[in-house]
Amino acid sequence: MFKFLDKAAFSKGMDGSVPEAESFEPKKVFPFASWGESLALVAEKLQKLSGTTEVEFLSIGARLHDFYARAGSIDHLSSDVAAQVGGEDIQEAIDRLVTLLNKVQEYLVDSEREAGQDCESLRKVLLLLEQVVEPLNSFGTINKVLRMLGISTKIESARLGNSAAGFDTIAADVANLSVQVLDKSQTILVQQTALSNTIRKTLEGVERIKTEQLLQVRGILDRIRANLETLKEINSNCSVIASVVANASSEISRSMSGVVTSMQFHDIVRQQIEHVETALTEVHQMLSSGEPGNIDVAVETSDICELQAAQLRQAGSEISDAVRSIIENLSSIAVKESHTAAKTRDMAGVADKAGSSFFSDMEEDLKRIAASFVSNAEANKSITTAMSSVAGTIGEIVNYVGDIEHIGEEIELIAMNAQIKAARTGDVGAALGVLAEAIQRLSVEAQEQTGNVSKTLLAVTDTTEHLFHDVGEDAAALDKEVDSIVNELDSVLRTLLYLNESIIGKVLGLESEVLSFSSDIESTTSSITVHELMVDGLADAIGCLDSIVGEVGSLIPLDLAKGKTERLKELATRYTMHSERKVHAGFTGTDLFDASTNTTDDLDDNVELF
């Protein structure tokens, strides 16, 4: 301990005389009370500063945790979008649509082939019905000849008188039967004409419907296939963008995790300031109980103040750098989120190309295909209706032909009876015999013509029955298949529309989340000023401590301020953070202070201090 001489000693030498060249300073009195008050005030301000900023730091921490959670949510949502865009559901729906379009294509091929066969059968029926006209027209000639023969028979019978009795009746019967043949043949011709018109109309309708259907459905199929390729391209583009967005969101989420972790600096700085508060409070207590002239207390006060100032500088630097780093990282994340929002907007725009209007067009095309299928079914029904009509009319014609054939047989029988009667009359009935023979020949001709008509009608019946059977079976099978295809097409389109709307909804939701997230980050970063408040508060405290250190330095010679390491060892045991130990080590380093020497031990009580 240094000893200071009192004022009386200053005026006397060792022998009581007054030295001529030497003078002595009076014993120094250090302003411990003032320093103690200053340190107590600094400790109080540091405590208030920690309390004041604690709420703000906790608020920042809460916002960062919220950002971290939202970044994770955005990451999850973007991954969900990417998974849905590139997922199996859309691909399966597209594959199903391709399969169904191929089925429609196969249906068209089958329909075209069957339409050709149906039309060919209808043309065959028309041709057969045309073949009936000639033999039916011949019945008119037969009728005329029979009428002429009947008249001739009447004339000859009148000439012969009683010897030709009965020939009048024969002539009347022949005339009557010839009229019946003509009437029935005319009826058959009318029915044949009606049938031909019906079949011709059916044929024209079938050909028109089939042609229009093929052209329309082929055009629709081409359009749907083109839309399908567009859909695939849209899905591919969305998948690429979604992958980029998902990767960016994952990176942002990881960055946000790092930002949240960096908030640990606050706990470190808070503890560091608390340790400074404790140290300054202890110095205040030491000063309160110390002798105003105790140089050791003054030196220790200076050392502790200087060390705590260094700790506060390091704390201020760390908090400033850390908060600035957080702001920069958050700003970087906000920029990335803005880019992500732009990408998301691009994806929404791409996906919207396959929006409701896109699928509405496809749905309209589907309705046209369904309508075309309905027209095809109606065409098939018209064929079956026509064939039913043909079958019924052919049945009536066959009955008429049978009647004509029966009339021919009756005429032949009458002719044979006439021949027998003519033979009985002898030479006078020779003319009647010739007439009877002519009538018989006409009856045979009539029977031959009815046979030809019957064969033709049989061919018509066979063709119409096959056509009716084939078209009926095909129509039933095709109607069932068409219903299945149309229903499945509708289901697939609805699935694709739902998936696309779901993707668009999620993409728009993702964009909204990203924009909101970016906006909130920007708002937060612009409002963070707590580090400035903290740094300013620490600077005030450091200024006060530096002032005390300066005062001590001005009162005590430098060589008396050695031994820093020994004096501060106890403080080193309190540190809980590496940063504190690092500052302490730097402050007590041997390159700055030599703790191996203690000059105070070498001074005796009479050392004069200047």
Image (cartoon, rainbow, N blue to C red):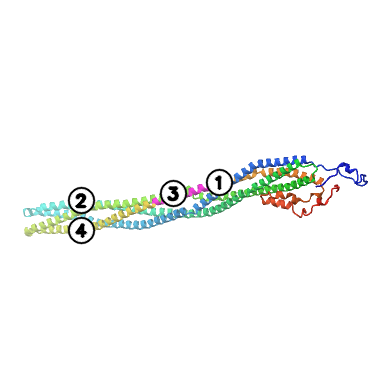
Rate crowding at label 2 as few (under 14), some (14 to 19) or many (20 or more) other CA atoms within 10 Å: some
Give how far apart the Cα atoms at labels 4 and 3 are: 63 Å
Q: Pointer 4 and pointer 3: residues touching (CB < 8 Å)?
A: no
Rate crowding at label 3 as few (under 14), some (14 to 19) or many (20 or more) other CA atoms within 10 Å: some
Q: Mark 2: which secondary structure?
A: helix
The answer to whether residue 88 is magenta is no
Q: Mark 3: which secondary structure?
A: helix
Nearest to viewer (mark 4 / mark 3) = 3
* Residue 202 at x, y percent in the picture: 32, 52
Amino acid type of the residue that numbered disc 3 sits on in the rendered structure:
Arg
Q: Mark 1: which secondary structure?
A: helix
Residue at numbered disc 2: 183
Q: Is residue 536 visible?
A: no
Query: Of marks 4 and 1, which one's residue comes earlier in the chain?
Result: 4
Nearest to viewer (mark 3 / mark 1) = 1
Give how far apart the Cα atoms at labels 3 and 1 are: 28 Å
Rate crowding at label 1 as few (under 14), some (14 to 19) or many (20 or more) other CA atoms within 10 Å: some
Nearest to viewer (mark 1 / mark 2) = 1
Residue at numbered disc 4: 451
Nearest to viewer (mark 2 / mark 3) = 3
Amino acid type of the residue that numbered disc 2 sits on in the rendered structure:
Asp
